[in-house]
């Protein structure tokens, strides 16, 4: 525990003034030619968003909220990691390490921290309480930026195991979506001495034996995955092959960083065509600021260069108790029989009626119910 240091975010006013200057002097492209989002995030919306960012958005509000949470840093394997560690008042609570993805951050968990750690105060049962650990991925937010290759999902999962041990947790469970799901699945293979079970809302798998006699749900899931590869994966191709090249624009231009991220909140949320139907403008910009302020555009993209090749390739089986919650607008969806190919001890599987890729952010009540239900099998 002596290696763990309390942390507070303290962004210099000069950095916020610099953001204001950049948002005042923007070199805009012409508008898109269609009247929809098919060429990317529309010019009119970006102008409106950036006007709000410049004139009304208050970072100090978000900073104050984050600083009201127990934040820490610790060095693991030569890299400094930032994390939240929110203990429940119930000393018998189950330790849970929960991992975000791209283009998310710990901001995604803002609505579920309270219900997960203090369920009795949020309409739940005290027996469902968790001690919550939310680390920031390497190269993201206020964690350190790797200076050499090698920080793929397996190494991150092993680092999370070391973090939980350092916090004094001999037995714990893990949860994640997006890259957090990949890290969590990796922990389900490498950290089995101490990780008692996992839950994901985007299972990382590649069904091989169960592609015959497809159900309507499976056919729809395959069509959605094909749409992603054909029309929605350009960002991933760039970040998995040339993260440094795209990083110059993302680190230099707040407009580029915001557009790069928020377009995905349009594509991947269950929002009826506009991200602000499910998330507020402040919530969207709070998340963008977790990339802009620490200049994380390039460093966060490198996880794709490190690990994107695992998507769609055969994966090692996971033998520990596992749960999967499938939200309807998730990028990659999977039927129960597909999931059971990889997750050999599947104790929870549920298909939800509403929600997308950012489940904890979009549908916090449903997300909390799913996490509680899954991990009741592992307490």
Image: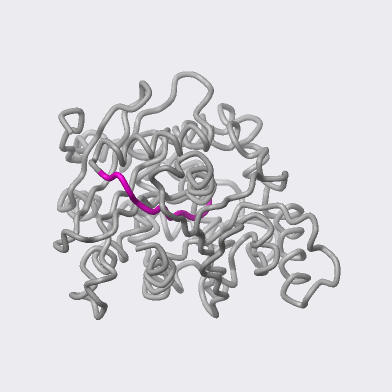
Say which quadrant the C terminus sits in. Answer: bottom left
Q: Is residue 260 visible?
A: no
Furthest residue in direction front, as rendered? 193
Residue at 48% across, 32% down? 155
Residue at 31% across, 65% down? 112
Q: Is residue 225 visible?
A: yes
Residue 135 found in image quarter: top left
Q: State whether residue 105 is above or below residue 347.
A: above
Judged left or right of residue 272, residue 220 is right
Residue at 21% across, 67% down? 118
Count of marks overlaid on the render? 0
> Residue 341 at what x, y percent from top left?
69, 58
Residue 162 found in image quarter: top left
What colouring does the structure picture have?
A: one colour
> Residue 348 at what x, y percent from top left?
51, 69
User: Looking at the image, which is closer to me, 173 or 171?
Assistant: 171
> Residue 303 at what x, y percent from top left?
53, 36
Q: Tell me where the magenta segment starts and ends, as one range.
A: 169-178
Task: Inspect the magenta stretch and tell me whether residue 171 lies in it.
Answer: yes
Judged left or right of residue 325, residue 369 is left
Judged left or right of residue 7, residue 326 is right
> Residue 175 at what x, y percent from top left?
43, 55
User: Looking at the image, which is closer to me, 53 or 27?
Assistant: 53
Task: Inspect the magenta stretch and tell me whether residue 27 lies in it.
Answer: no
Say which quadrant the N terminus sits in. Answer: top left
User: Looking at the image, which is closer to me, 74 or 188?
Assistant: 188
């Amino acid at each position: 525990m002596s290696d763990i240091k309390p942390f507070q975010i303290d962004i210099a006013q000069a950095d916020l003034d610099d953001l204001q200057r950049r948002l005042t002097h923007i070199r805009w492209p012409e508008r898109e030619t269609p009247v929809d989002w098919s060429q990317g995030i529309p010019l009119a919306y970006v102008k409106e968003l950036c006007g709000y960012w410049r004139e009304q958005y208050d970072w100090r509000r978000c900073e104050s909220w984050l600083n009201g949470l127990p934040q820490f840093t610790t060095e693991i394997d030569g890299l400094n990691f930032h994390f939240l560690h929110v203990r429940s008042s119930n000393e018998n609570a189950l330790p849970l390490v929960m991992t975000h993805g791209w283009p998310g951050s710990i901001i995604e968990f803002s609505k579920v921290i309270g219900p997960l750690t203090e369920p009795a105060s949020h309409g739940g049962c005290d027996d469902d309480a968790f001690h919550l650990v939310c680390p920031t991925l390497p190269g993201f937010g206020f964690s350190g930026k790797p200076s050499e290759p090698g920080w793929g999902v397996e190494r991150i999962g092993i680092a999370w195991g070391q973090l939980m041990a350092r916090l004094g947790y001999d037995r714990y469970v893990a949860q994640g979506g997006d890259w957090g799901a990949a890290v969590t699945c990796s922990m389900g293979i490498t950290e089995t001495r101490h990780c008692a079970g996992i839950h994901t809302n985007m299972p990382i798998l590649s069904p091989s034996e169960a592609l015959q006699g497809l159900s309507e749900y499976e056919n729809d899931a395959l069509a959605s995955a094909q749409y992603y590869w054909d029309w929605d994966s350009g960002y991933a191709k760039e970040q998995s092959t040339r993260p440094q090249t795209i990083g110059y624009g993302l680190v230099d231009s707040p407009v580029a960083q915001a557009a790069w991220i928020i377009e995905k909140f349009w594509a991947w949320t269950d929002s009826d065509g506009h991200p602000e139907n499910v998330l507020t403008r402040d919530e969207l910009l709070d998340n963008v600021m977790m990339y802009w302020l620490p200049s994380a555009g390039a460093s966060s993209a490198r996880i794709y260069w490190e690990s994107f090749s695992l998507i769609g390739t055969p994966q090692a089986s996971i033998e520990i108790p596992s749960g999967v919650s499938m939200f309807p607008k998730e990028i990659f969806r999977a039927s129960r029989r597909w999931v059971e190919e990889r997750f050999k001890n599947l104790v929870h599987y549920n298909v939800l009626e509403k929600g997308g890729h950012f489940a904890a952010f979009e549908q916090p009540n449903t997300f909390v119910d799913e996490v509680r239900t899954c991990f009741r099998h592992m307490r």
